[in-house]
Image (tube, helix red, strand yellow):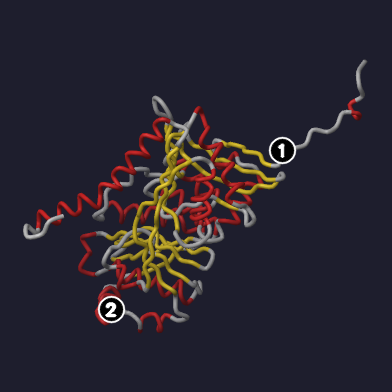
Amino acid sequence: MITPAFLHPARPMPSHQIETYTGAAALPADARALLAYHARQTLQFSAAWFANLEATVFPGHPGVCHFVLRTEGKVAAVLPLLVTPGRISHRAQALGNYYTCLYEPALADDVDATQLGLLFKAVRRYKGGISTLTLAPMRLEGRAFTLVEQALAAAGFKTERYFCFGNWHLQAPPTWAAYLAGREGKLRSTIKRMAQKLAAEQAQIEILTEPADLERGIAAYHAVYAKSWKVPEPSADFMPGLMRLCAAAGALRLGLVWLHGQPIAAQLWMVHGGRAEVYKLAYDEAFKGYSPGTVLTARLMQHVIEHDKVAEVDYLIGDDAYKTSWMSHRRERWGLVAYNQRSLTGMVLWQGTRMKSFAKPWVQRVRSAASNPGHTP
């Protein structure tokens, strides 16, 4: 006898589900929507950012994986990762590289550490087991860092924090005049003198913001970069892709200095969510005596303060000395290394990390004693 289907009690849908996708383009619309919500802060959190990274830096890489956590059918978190296989176990890291200045998983406002821990449990078991997971560079301030740290612990990982880099930024004043008045006299003098020097030779400065101007802007950027002190880009297509996605998002601020018909300085700034990020800068070293980079930075700074009305300007990566002349505050970006305690490799690596931490004070004391023979450790 066959029992009618309507007499069977309905199977309850699981309250939490984990999904995996092999690229940003494959993500469902609601997962992309959560990324877009998170990307209000910076385009580096957007699906378009990850799609460009995947296409230009990791094309065809089998380890690209976006983990999606659903709670009661609603997307609660999106975690873009890159998994590298090993002989015994695998390593996972944030989906990013040297082009990445900031990373966080996209989190719904109501997701908690217990729920997020379920996502990291799925990461821990992925493809037979992940021994270590590295997430960086992240903000110490805000909700995500602490929540991720708690969720990793709930998922059976041991975690260690590590310093990535200093990050200089500016709380933008309401006017360019107010900003300039707060800078050192030496910088103000350099901006004035070099701007006059460039103007005397009919130099032109332009700031490209529209898609229609982009391709000639990309060509000018490449021409400057090739004559700068910088090494060639490891992934040549990444920067053009980034400029195109910035143009499409209305975030493009591509500054160029032209002298005698040729570009001698170029800078890419991204304006989004009330913030300006200084992403890339270069100048032709043959024209260093004109300080074209300084003059261009000043013009872009004036533009984002007066025209874009940004609340913050962010110099992104590093403690370069020149940044202190332009910025007002410093903060730090940190990372998390998580060791899977259900993986032999993860346990061994964690114990090695602990031993180094315990030994470090003693090593420092021994070194101090060696440099000061009159003292003993």
Q: Amino acid at mark 1?
A: Pro
Q: Is 90 rendered above or below residue 364?
A: above
Q: Secondary structure at mark 1?
A: loop
Give the CA separation, mark 2 to mark 1.
68 Å
Q: Secondary structure at mark 2?
A: helix
* Label drawn at residue 196: 2
Quadrant where the N terminus lies?
top right
Q: Return the residue found at the far front.
A: 376
- Left or right, residue 28 beside residue 317: right
Query: Is residue 60 at least partly visible in the picture?
Result: no
Label 2 vs 1, first from the N-terminus: 1
Q: Whole-percent x and y of residue 208?
A: 45, 63
Q: Residue at x 42, y 38 (%)?
A: 132
Q: Residue at x 28, y 73 (%)?
A: 198
Q: Is 259 rendered above or below residue 190?
A: above
Q: Return the residue found at the far left.
A: 373
Q: Which residue is mark 1?
A: 14
- Left or right, residue 210 beside residue 5: left
Q: Residues within 10 Å of mark 2 (few under 14, many from 20)?
A: some
Q: Whole-percent x and y of residue 141?
A: 47, 62
Q: Amino acid at mark 2?
A: Gln
* Label drawn at residue 48: none
- Left or right, residue 89 beside residue 260: right
